[in-house]
């Protein structure tokens, strides 16, 4: 079943149009990676899907329902969570409080969920009562993922989760993403680190100049010659 | 859209009609008294327009958020006063300076009639500029809102100095008997027209200076850094230096405005230079007229001072005692509401900024999409990937 | 020509200085950070230590004034931190709170410039409402008045938020537009006070109030019961705000919005709702602060703007968005102000203190600018 579908989405910042009709589809339980050169509109696509940028034309469907132009709050309530690339934790709040903010719109008792989520990220668990501003880059990224899981989303949108992390941290973050996916959460991520991310993805999309360029399974894109030349560095 | 375009001429006509008809009706359509009322009104508009132009240089063109106009205005007015007055003699009236007599040495146009005033205005400009220079070192690098709070604080601090240091400028009692340029040449009844001419002349000189400055390469840098400091810095411009120059240039104009204010009134008192009057009203004038536009600044001074004057004229009409006894406060209420309404409904002001790049390229047609204050700033989002 | 002169002045005097300072700051950021805070604390500690030995009374009054300022500054810092703009109407709103309480208590408005009209009924006409409680000068009438004022001011600010600030936010206006708008609203607020209650100063309870003597061992101080009450109220409310911010969901959301409004929105936090509650809390606090201030001094429409500088100084000194910083900042400002105008100090025959009373609020300005120079993020603020 299709969880998320963007159909011919046109969007941008103010007058500037970045996406000229991009379509993607995410099936249940999939990891989908979006790659492409700088300026291709990868992050713009995530922001538009999540309702942070207005969708000028085209449609966004979530769980079969038309959610075009809905606000981020509504999307979060419907089970879609988004992790920005940078500034994705509240630095003056403790780790625990960050997670509580992740569960802000939940009306039920979310305390068990905090324990459950923290169990996934042992190094963050250790620093539970530390202010998030004091965490290392990798720990922050973990906390950002943990925060997004608080709403038990059916799909996670990740904007460059490996950006500006040390290589060993990148590996750890990707393995956590895989764990999250195995628990049944579909994942859409934008990545610069194309090779590593495609390896763990079910499918991938390549955007260029605000349009779909290629799509296929993770392996097929890794094997694709054109792809290899253009985006994987040979 | 059509109604929008009519707003500026209509508000101009409405204010003009009111400032003519109201005093005329009160005086029983006495021509002389209407003319003398209008002259006084127009003189004050010209003086305040000078100060608003100074603010326009600072905010409209340079993007320096000065909330301490009162300080520069006051320094200008007092400097001009102590320059043109004779030295203090009585022990009850004490002030520094008093160069009026010693400056009246030039044997031209009957000594003492003009030189002290020119000196006074130049000194006022220099003092206000020096103040701006001194202030810019600690404050100009600050974020806009910190700069505003600091400047409002410093203006109040200066006012405290004026009030407290008795030997400086006669503290709370202020200075009276400030000589007025060419006063002895004319009949007292005619003098107001002469002074009106002087004020308009100063306004024209300042207007031309600002217009030329702003269209020079220097002015283009100022506006570039108002829009985007980072890019301007990246193109090799010394942002701090240019900002400081814009700030000082604006402050000097405010100082000149203060000097012609002092000559017009013949007296200065610290009560005038409160933040509510001497800072806020110029912001209202600039915002109403349209910041980043010199003609807008002058129109704003006209409209706002018109409203100010009209609301006092209302006293002559039948109205409940409750309102009559509070007419000053009602006026404050009007001016305060006016700026809020303008910023809500017409943020670019009556004459929005035009995109004028250079004297040589000419003008783009149509108003700029966004003014300096006014219209939406670009969304605070990272650039697209 | 002017341009050339300025250019020369800048290159010879300003640039070497600022460049050296900036280089040093860039090379040793942590050192400068600590030095800035240490300088502020040390200067202040020296001032207090020296003042408390010679004039403990002034330090105590400074603490009272500081605790009143703190209530206003906490509201200001929350608004500043959460909505990211300097609210220049805060001082006048504070005074308006004092007047609303006055109106509820006495039912008095000005009829003409010099004459008052009293409503037939007010809280003050309840039996015993004006009867002093214990050693205090006022009865329960004023306490009811204060509570009503807190509610009225909170609603007033929420209304302004909906009518003025929210449309400006929707348009994405800059902080400058917000600042000028709030200055306009300050003028409107002051004009309303002048229209309704007239320009003459008023007091809640007239007459001479007797102060009690307290022996501190090394010195004695005198304090009125009212002043102890002010301090107690300020402390209780500060503790409540602290509890709200660190223990409740709303408070944590407020801190989250202070940190990062965009991420708060992404997390599903309704920021507009947080803004509304911020106005409610800030308004209630500032109304109470206004009543306490009027008890300590007087009701006077022009005091509102005068208060603005110490309020902003406390906020900036403490660090914008930090309520504990606002408390510390307000105490420092309050004590420094009182001490500076009341204690003699001469160094090497040069008389430095006391300052003339007109300079009282200039002390706040000087501290504020010093803070912005040595530690722009304030004592408790997050690093910019």
Image (tube, coloured by chain):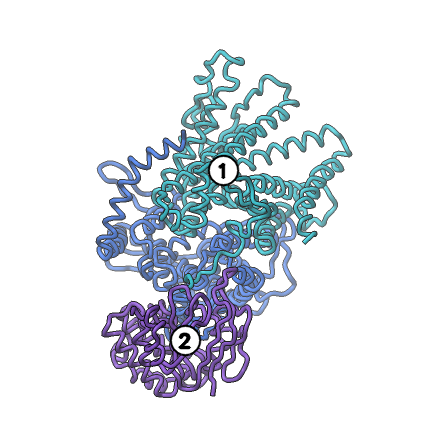
Chain colours: A purple, B cyan, C blue
Residue C181 coordinates in the image, percent (x, y): 53, 54
Image-based side of B286 in relation to B161, left or right: right
Q: Are marks 1 and 2 in contact (CB under 8 Å)?
A: no
| Helix, strand or loop for disc 2 | strand
Q: Chain of mark 1?
A: B
Image-based side of B96 in relation to B324, left or right: left
Label 1 – label 2 distance at C-alpha: 50 Å
Residue C191 coordinates in the image, percent (x, y): 58, 51
Name the residue carrying label 2. Answer: A205
Nearest the viewer among B311 and C290 is: B311
Residue B89 coordinates in the image, percent (x, y): 44, 22
Question: Is residue C147 visible in the rendered structure shown here?
Answer: no
Which image quadrant: the C terminus of chain B? Answer: bottom left
Question: Is residue A198 visible in the rendered structure shown here?
Answer: yes
Q: Chain of mark 2?
A: A
Q: Which mark is residue B151?
A: none
| Residue A24 versus residue B96 in the image, above or below | below
Identify the residue at image location x=27%, y=80%: A125
Closest to the camera, between mark 1 and mark 2, is: 2
Name the residue carrying label 1. Answer: B215
Q: Residues within 10 Å of mark 1 (few under 14, many from 20)?
A: some
Nearest the viewer among C52 and C184 is: C184
């Amino acid at each position: 079943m299709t969880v998320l579908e963007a159909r011919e989405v046109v969007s941008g910042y103010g007058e500037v149009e970045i996406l000229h009709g991009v379509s993607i589809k995410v099936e249940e339980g999939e990891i989908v990676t979006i790659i492409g050169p700088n300026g291709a509109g990868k992050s713009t696509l995530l922001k538009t899907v999540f309702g942070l940028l207005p969708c000028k034309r085209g449609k966004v469907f979530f769980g079969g329902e038309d959610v075009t132009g809905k606000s981020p709050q509504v999307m979060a309530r419907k089970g879609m969570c988004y992790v920005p690339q940078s500034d994705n934790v509240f630095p003056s709040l403790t780790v625990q409080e960050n997670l509580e903010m992740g569960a802000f719109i939940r009306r039920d008792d979310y305390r068990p969920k905090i324990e459950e989520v923290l169990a996934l990220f042992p190094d963050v668990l250790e620093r539970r009562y530390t202010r998030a501003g004091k965490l290392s880059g990798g720990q922050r990224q973990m906390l950002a993922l943990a925060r997004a899981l608080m709403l038990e989303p059916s799909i996670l949108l990740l904007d460059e989760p490996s950006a500006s992390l040390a290589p060993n941290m990148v590996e750890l973050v990707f393995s956590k993403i895989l764990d999250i996916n195995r628990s049944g959460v579909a994942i859409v991520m934008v990545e610069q680190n194309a090779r590593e991310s495609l390896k763990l993805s079910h499918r991938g999309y390549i955007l260029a100049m605000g349009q779909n360029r290629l799509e296929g399974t993770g392996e097929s894109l890794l094997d694709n010659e054109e792809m290899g030349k253009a985006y994987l560095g040979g | 859209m059509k109604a929008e375009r009519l707003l500026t001429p209509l508000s101009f006509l409405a204010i003009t009609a009111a400032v003519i008809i109201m005093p005329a009706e009160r005086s029983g359509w006495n021509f002389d008294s209407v003319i003398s009322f209008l002259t006084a009104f127009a003189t004050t508009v010209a003086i305040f327009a000078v100060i608003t132009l100074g603010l326009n240089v600072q905010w409209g063109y340079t993007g320096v958020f000065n909330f301490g106009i009162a300080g520069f205005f006051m320094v200008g007015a007092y400097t001009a006063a102590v320059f043109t007055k004779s030295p203090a003699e009585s022990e009850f009236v004490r002030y520094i300076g008093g160069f009026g007599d010693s400056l009246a040495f030039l044997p031209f146009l009957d000594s003492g009639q003009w030189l002290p005033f020119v000196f006074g205005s130049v000194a006022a400009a220099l003092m206000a500029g020096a103040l701006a220079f001194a202030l810019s070192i600690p404050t100009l690098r600050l974020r806009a809102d910190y700069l505003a709070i600091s400047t409002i604080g410093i203006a109040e601090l200066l006012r405290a100095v004026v009030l407290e240091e008795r030997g400086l400028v006669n503290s709370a009692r202020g200075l009276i008997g400030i000589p007025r340029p060419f006063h002895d040449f004319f009949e007292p009844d005619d003098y107001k027209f002469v002074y009106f001419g002087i004020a308009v002349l100063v306004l024209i000189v300042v207007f031309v200076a600002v217009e030329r400055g702003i269209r020079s390469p220097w002015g283009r840098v100022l506006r570039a850094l108002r829009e985007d400091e980072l890019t301007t810095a990246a193109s090799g411009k010394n942002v701090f230096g240019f900002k400081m120059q814009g700030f000082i240039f604006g402050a000097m104009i405010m100082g000149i405005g203060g000097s012609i204010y002092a000559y017009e009134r013949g007296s200065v008192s610290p009560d005038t230079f409160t933040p509510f009057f001497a800072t806020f009203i110029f912001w209202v004038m600039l915002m109403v007229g349209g910041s980043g536009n010199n003609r807008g600044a002058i129109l704003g001074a006209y409209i706002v001072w018109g409203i100010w004057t009209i609301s006092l004229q209302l006293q002559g009409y039948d109205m409940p005692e409750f309102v009559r006894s509070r007419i000053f406060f009602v006026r404050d209420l009007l001016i305060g509401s006016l700026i809020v309404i303008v910023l809500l409904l017409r943020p670019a002001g009556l004459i929005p900024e035009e995109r004028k790049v250079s004297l040589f390229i000419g003008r783009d047609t149509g108003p700029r999409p966004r003014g300096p204050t006014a219209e939406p700033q670009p969304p605070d989002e990272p650039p697209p990937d | 020509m002017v341009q050339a002169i300025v250019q020369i002045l800048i290159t010879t005097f300003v640039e070497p200085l600022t460049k050296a300072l900036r280089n040093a700051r860039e090379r040793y950021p942590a050192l400068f950070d600590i030095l800035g805070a240490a300088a502020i604390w040390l200067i202040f500690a020296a001032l207090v230590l020296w003042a408390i030995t010679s004039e403990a009374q002034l330090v105590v009054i400074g603490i009272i004034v500081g605790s009143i300022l703190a209530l206003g500054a906490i509201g200001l810092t929350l608004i500043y931190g959460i909505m990211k703009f300097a609210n220049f109407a805060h001082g006048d709103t504070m005074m308006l709170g004092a007047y609303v309480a006055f109106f509820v208590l006495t039912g008095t408005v000005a009829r003409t410039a010099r004459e008052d009209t009293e409503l037939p009924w007010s809280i003050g006409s309840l039996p015993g409402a004006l009867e002093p409680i214990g050693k205090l000068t006022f009865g329960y009438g004023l306490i009811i008045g204060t509570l009503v004022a807190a509610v009225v001011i909170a609603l007033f600010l929420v209304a302004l938020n909906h009518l003025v600030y929210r449309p400006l936010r929707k348009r994405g206006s800059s902080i400058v537009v917000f600042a000028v708008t709030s200055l306009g609203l300050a003028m409107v607020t002051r004009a309303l006070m002048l229209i309704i209650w007239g320009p003459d100063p008023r007091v809640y309870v007239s007459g001479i109030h007797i102060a009690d003597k307290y022996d501190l061992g090394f010195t004695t101080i005198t304090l009125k019961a009212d002043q102890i009450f002010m301090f107690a109220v300020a402390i209780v409310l500060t503790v409540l705000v602290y509890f709200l911010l660190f223990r409740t969901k709303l408070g944590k959301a407020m801190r989250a919005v202070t940190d990062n409004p965009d991420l708060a929105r992404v997390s599903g936090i309704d920021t507009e709702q947080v803004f509304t509650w911020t106005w409610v809390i800030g308004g209630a606090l500032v109304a109470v602060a206004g009543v306490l201030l009027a008890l300590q001094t007087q009701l006077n429409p022009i005091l509102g703007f005068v208060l603005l500088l110490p309020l902003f100084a406390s906020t900036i000194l403490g660090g914008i968005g930090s309520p504990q910083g606002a408390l510390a900042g307000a105490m420092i400002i309050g004590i420094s102000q009182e001490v500076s105008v009341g204690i003699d100090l001469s160094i090497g025959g040069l008389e430095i203190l006391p300052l003339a009373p007109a300079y009282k609020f200039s002390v706040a300005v000087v501290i504020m600018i010093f803070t912005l120079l040595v530690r722009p993020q304030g004592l408790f603020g997050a690093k910019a």
